[in-house]
Amino acid sequence: MALPPDATPFKKRYPTLEQNEVLNATASAVLVSALAGTGKTTTLAIKAADLLRQQRASRILMLAYSEAGLAAIAQRLEKFVPAIPRQVRIMTVEQLCAGVLQEQGDTLVRVTEPLQRHLLIHQAHGALVADPEPSDAPEARDFLARDLDVQAFMAFEALAKQRLLQRDIGASQMGALDYCRDNALDYGQYLLLQKYERLRRGLNNEPLFYAPGDCTYEVATQLAALEFGDTFAPLQDRFDAVLFDELQDLDEAAMCVLRQLVQGGNGLFVGAGDFNQHILPGAFSVFGNSLSRIRQELPVDTQVVSIGTTYRFGKAICDGLNPLFGVQFAPHYATKPAWFERRSYDDDEDCARQLLAIHDAVRDRPSQPPGGEAPPPCLNVVLRSPHDSVLLEWVFAHEGVHYACKGMKRFYQRREIALVLALMGAMQGCSDGVRLTQGILSSAIEGLLRHVRRTSQPDEDVLANGAFDMQALAKDSPAETDTRVVAAELIGKQALLRRFLVRASFNPEAPVASPALEQLLDLPPDACADAGLLCAHPLLLQFFAQAPISPDAQRRCTDSLHALARICTGLSVNEFLGRLAMMVNASIAQHRQAEPPTLQLLTVERCKGHEYDDVAVPLVERGRFPRSVARHDAYRERNMLYVAMTRARKRLWLLEGRQRPVSPGPV
C-alpha cells in the first residue's frame, strides 16, 4: 500500500463566514455549537483579541473545563496577541472557584495524592461502621457487610458532587433512602459520602482539605443556597466578558457557576462546545441534549451559532464521518488532500497485521518537510480500552516497531499485569536468572498494595470528635510511599521477592497478605510449563475476585488477564519472561538513544483536544467499540468513537470487525 506524499501545507485563513457570525453577533450571550476542527477555540481567541484592541476591555475571563483546554486557549490566543496580557485571565472552573474561596478567607489545603485519598476514605468507612446510631435500612446493613470498595466510592462521590445530589434530595421532599431507591442509587455509598463530608468539614463546618473538584462543589453549594434574586458578590460585576470553551463537559455544579457568571453583570458571554465530544461521566451531553440544557441558563435573546466548516481535514474524511455520526462536516479547503479508508478484519491478530501494514505505508511515505529535518512520520492508533493494547504491543515490538503509549502505561507496567509478571518470576518453576526491571517490580508492588492494602490506624478519638485524623496520613510504611526503593531491593532476589509477595512486607513476622497468592507461589515447578494457563489459574482469579476493588476494576483485571494469556499461551514462564525482557530492553535502548517512535498508542481520553496527521482506529465493532451499555451511557460511547476518528488531519483508517461493523451508521 503506497500513500501519496504530503502536499504543501495549507495556510489557515481566519475567520470563516461561520466564525464571523460569532464575532459580529450583537446579542449579550452567544452559544457556539461547533464540530471538531472547526476553530471554536480560535474563534474565542479572536474574540478576546478584538475585545482587547477594539473595545479596550480590561477584564476578560477565559474559562475551560480541563487543563488541556487551558493550554489550547493560550496557544490560540498567542497567535493574535504578542503575549497574553494581564487583562486576560485563563483558568479552569475549579481554579476560578478556588480563587473565590481564598477571597472568602478559606485556607486551601490540597489533597491530591491517591494514597492519601484512599486512607481518608478508609477512615470515613471506619467511622461509619463505628457509628453508635447506624441506619437500620437493609441497604445500609448490606453495604457495611461488604468490603470497602474505594474506587466505587470515589466514582459515587464525584458524580454526587457534580450533580449536586444533596440539593436534589432536598428539592424532592423525599428522604434520602427513598430518593436513592427511586433513582437506583447505592444508599450505603450515600451514607459513606455523608460521613466523609462531615469529617472533611470538621466540627467548625470549615473544610479541612480540598480534593480535585471540591472547590467547584463548595461554590456551587453556596450558590444553590441563595434565595431567588440574591447576588453572589465574589462573581458579581467582575469581568467585561466571559469566554467559555469546552461547554460540552459541564456538569451541574459547574453549571451553577456558569449561571452566576452570566446573570452577575459580567458583560458579554460567548460559550463554545462540540457536543459530540462529551466523554466524561456526569456531563449533560451524556443524554445528547446538553445544548438545550445549557440554553436554559442563558438569556432569552441568546444567539445560537452552528459551525460545521472544518480546517482540520479534507473532503474524503468529511464524507466518511458525516453518515457515520449523522453530522454535517464541510471542508474549509475543498481541494485539501485527505485519505479515508475503511477496512475489515476477521480477528484481533488480523487487525494487528493490518495495522502493521498501515504503519509501514506511513513510515515509508515520501515526505516534503517545509524546511530542515522533520521527525519520521508516526501512525497514531486510538484505542477504546487499554487492555486492547496488549496484543498490539507484543506484535509491534516483535516486528521491531518503536512505539510509544500515551494515556496509558505499556502493558507490562500496569499494576495488575506487573503483579502477575512478578508472581511468575517468583514461582518455583521459574529460573532465578530471569530478572524483572525496577519499573515492572515497582508497578507490581503498587498492584499488590492496592489489592491487599493495610492502612494506617487513625486516632479513634479524633474521628469520634467529628474530624479526620490528618496526622495518620504520615504514618505509612516505606513500601506504601516509595515502591521504587522497595523494587530496587527485590531485583534478582527471587526468594526475597516470593516472601514479599506473600506478606506485602519485608517483615517475616507480618501476617500473610493473601492466602491465594501464598498457595499460588507454593505450586510445583510444572505449573510454569504454560504461562497462558497460569494466567487463568483459579488461585489467581480468586485473588483478584476477593480484592476490595469495584466490579469495574475487577472486570478490567479480568480483561487484562485474558489479554496477557493470549500472548503467552503455549510459552513456558521462562520463555515468556525471556521474550518480555528482550522487548523491554529494546524499548529502554530506543529511549536512551532518543529515537522517535513511528507508532503511538493512545486512549480516547488522552487524544481528546489533539490532532495528528495519520490516525488509525482499530478494533471497532458493535459491543466492543462502541461498547454495549445502558441507554444513559450510549451517547457517551458514540462520542468516544467520534473523538477518536476526528483526530486525523490528513489520513484516517477505520478497522471494523467483519461480523459486527458499525458502518454505514449512524452510530
Image (cartoon, helix red, strand yellow):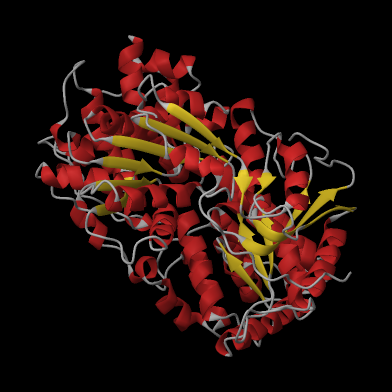
Q: Position of residue 92 (x, y in %)?
A: 34, 48
Residue 414 sits above or below residue 494 on the image: above
Residue 476 sits above or below residue 622 on the image: below
- Quarter containing the C terminus: top right
Instruction: Please report the residue visible at 41 percent of the width from the left and 28 percent of the height from the top.
Output: 188
Q: Quick check: can you spot residue 439?
A: yes
387 to the left or right of 461: right
Instruction: Please report the residue visible at 18 percent of the width from the left and 40 percent of the height from the top.
Output: 238
Q: Quick check: can you spot residue 209?
A: no
Residue 122 or 625: which is nearer the viewer?
Answer: 625
Residue 102 sits above or below residue 577 on the image: above
105 to the left or right of 294: left
Residue 611 or 439: which is nearer the viewer?
Answer: 611
550 to the left or right of 480: right
Q: Position of residue 171 (x, y in %)?
A: 32, 13
Residue 479 or 111: which is nearer the viewer?
Answer: 111
Q: Position of residue 91 (x, y in %)?
A: 31, 51
